[in-house]
Image (cartoon, rainbow, N blue to C red):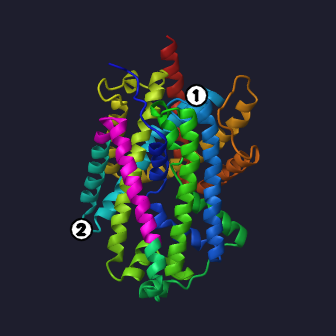
Amino acid sequence: MSTELSRSLGLVRACAMVVGIIIGASIFVQPSVVTRHVHSVAAAYAAWAGAGALTLFGALVCAELASAFPRSGGVYVFLTEAYSPALGFLWGWAMLWSMHSGIVAAIAVVLGRYVGYFVPLGDAATRGVAVAAILALSAVNYRGVKHGSAVQTTLTVAKVAAVVAIVAVGFALGARAGHAPPALAAAAAAPAVAAPVRGFALALGAGLFAFGGWHMVTYTAGETVAPDRTIPRALVIGTLAVTACYIALNAAYFHVLPLATVRSSTRVAADAADAVLGRGGGEVMAGVVVLSTLGALNGVILTGPRVYHSMARDGLLFRWLGDVHPAFRTPHHAIALQAVWASALVATGSYESLFSQVVYTEWVFFALMALGLFLLRRRPGYAPRFTVWGFPVAPALFILASLAVAANQVASASAASLPGLLLVLLGLPVYYARSAHVHH
């Protein structure tokens, strides 16, 4: 029996992973947050296009690094190669205990809440649905990357079809939406408050939030066919496809609802659906969000364990996390650990504070990853098959944007940001203890 992972992901499935992970629940609420910071519809479109462009710049950086180092682990591998195994370890450490497991937990809880749209659920039952979803999708991915990626592709095709349908119905029947729901109309009087430049920067940051997860396809390089070619293509195609979907969805929202209503809504997609379809439109949209969150959850569950598996193979985590299932050819112990820990975060409700404290550090790591590209290009033997378009401007803009997002998140939650940084830095003594053990 082979102890290696199975190479079975082609371009279509890799693209489905990029699109399916990025498009979760946030595009169905986040447009209101973006629009609140700007003074016009044109500025809102510009913010979404800008967020898409910055995400593309980050994806291009990842694409070049993935073509140079086409093995499982993604950002962990890139930081290790550009700087040191210690920095790569800190990324994986933060992923396992908070960043990635926290995302799994958060998406699962959103899924549970939207299921509650159809079946009234209390808090405990919502968490139960979330844990059940984590365990079920982890079981699918445990059985093989082919199964997990087939589910991913099916759900991605379904959700993109749903987005296209929302846009088509919005434009076809939008004329019926003459009025905002009364409660919204009353709340819609507040104008955007931020000054134009600062407001646009805040809108850009809010837009970037909806593009989260674009880098995760790089974690699966060890199971991708010709990863040095397939992953760069998937990153570019996937990011452009998501940007097109997001701009089209916003166009549908603005076609159906006035700017002030979009700005004040707490569930803009459901309000747009109610306006077009009458009462019950929100239920249709809740169904779309359930489908969308399922796809994002499956993709996040699929990708993360590949990082822990790579770290274990490098001697930086427990050796058993590097094991490959003899029949299914998956990192089965890493998948099981992620499922148990993410479920514990859901059950205890601790994922929200944990994730919000640590999320800004992800952007610091992204800035370091892009800076690492500049360092690697000066190093002999560095030979990527794909190179970033627009170097050095595109990666430099991505570095600035990443640092700005991190700074903004720290500024808005200054007291909560220090424990998050300490949690990440706690990985350093663990790393040095682990590497000392390996060398003995």
Query: Residue 431's spot in the image, x, y percent?
Result: 52, 26
Q: Is residue 338 magenta?
A: no
Magenta region: 139-167
Question: What residue did someone put label 1 on?
Answer: 86
State which quarter of the image contains the N terminus.
top left
The residue lying at 66 percent from left, 72 percent from top is: 43
Q: Earlier in the sequence, mark 1 or mark 2?
A: 1
Q: Which mark is residue 313?
A: none
User: Three-letter amino acid code at disc 2?
Assistant: Pro
- Residue 60, relative to residue 221: is it above or below? below
Residue plotted at (70% across, 31% down) = 376
Which residue is disc 2 drawn over? Answer: 120
Helix, strand or loop status at disc 2: loop
- Left/right placement of residue 333 relative to residue 211 reads left
The image shows residue 310 at horizontal and vertical percentages of 47, 28
User: Foreground: 418 or 360?
Assistant: 360
Q: How far is disc 1 from disc 2 in space, using C-alphas?
A: 47 Å
Mark 1: few, some, or many residues within 10 Å (few <14, many ≥20)?
some
